[in-house]
Image (cartoon, rainbow, N blue to C red):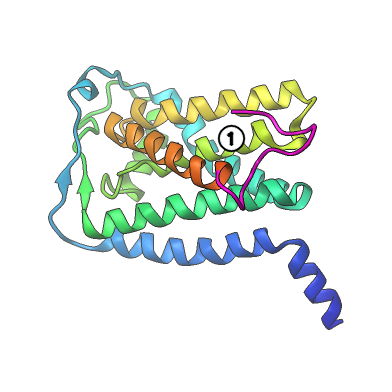
Amino acid sequence: MKNKLQELARSYRSLLVMAVYAVFYMIAFVYLEQRTSAVHEINFGIDAYIPFCEVFIIPYVMWFGYVAITVFYLCIRDKEESERLVAFLMAGMTIFIVVSAVFPNGHHLRPAVFPRDNVFTRMIAVLYASDTPTNVLPSIHVYNSIAIMIAVWRSKCFQGHKVITGFMLALGVSIILSTVLIKQHSTLDVLLAFILSGWMYSICYRRAGFRVRQKGTAKDW
């Protein structure tokens, strides 16, 4: 029995590590959300010209399943890629927590009054009530979406499945756009998420020990 449990733990190591990390991450995130302190306002001039588009609440909330299901699937089906993905996610999310702790930040981009009353604005109202416009830099919605798109593009599990790959990439782009279109994030949050993703990609995928190239299977991003 003990050997079976050890074998199971080794087989699904990435999944177990990510599950344990997620608990610590949520504890830290909730603590930072409840902390009362002055915040540095995040605002780019271009933010004022980005329209409010409530329908993008749909891809925004789909992000939770988008990340969780993909991580779970790859941890089961593609051990090598799941290890890179989990390392990528954990590194960026940890940096986000550290930034939020030492540099409290937030924005005032949310509309005081919704321009329309429909099911989408009501969903956004619920989101606004449960998620404060603080600790937004860099955007984890954007960062994790980029991580998922990279993993999907590179994993051997998705090779030959153009429709699924195309859908996953399109959904990832929609999620990224949603962060600014429903006024959850500033364009600066998005930009820094891309920069952080590029840096972490060079570490998790390019350097020795995390080489992504597999003979006859890997793609270049």
Image spot of residue 76 (x, y percent): 76, 52
Viewer-side residue, 105 vs 216? 216
Q: Main secondary structure of the magenta part?
A: loop
> Is 109 left, or right, of 140 in this rendering?
left
Q: Which residue is mark 1?
A: 150
- The type of residue carrying mark 1 is Ile
Image spot of residue 60 (x, y percent): 47, 34
The stretch drawn in magenta includes residue 44: no
Q: Quadrant of the N terminus?
A: bottom right
Q: Quadrant of the C terminus?
A: top right
> Where is 40 relative to 152, above or below?
below
Any part of residue 12 in sight: yes
> Is 75 left, or right, of 183 in this rendering?
right
Write the residue at 80% across / 32% down: 216
Highlighted magenta segment, given as a residue range: 207-221
> Where is 85 relative to 180, above or below?
below
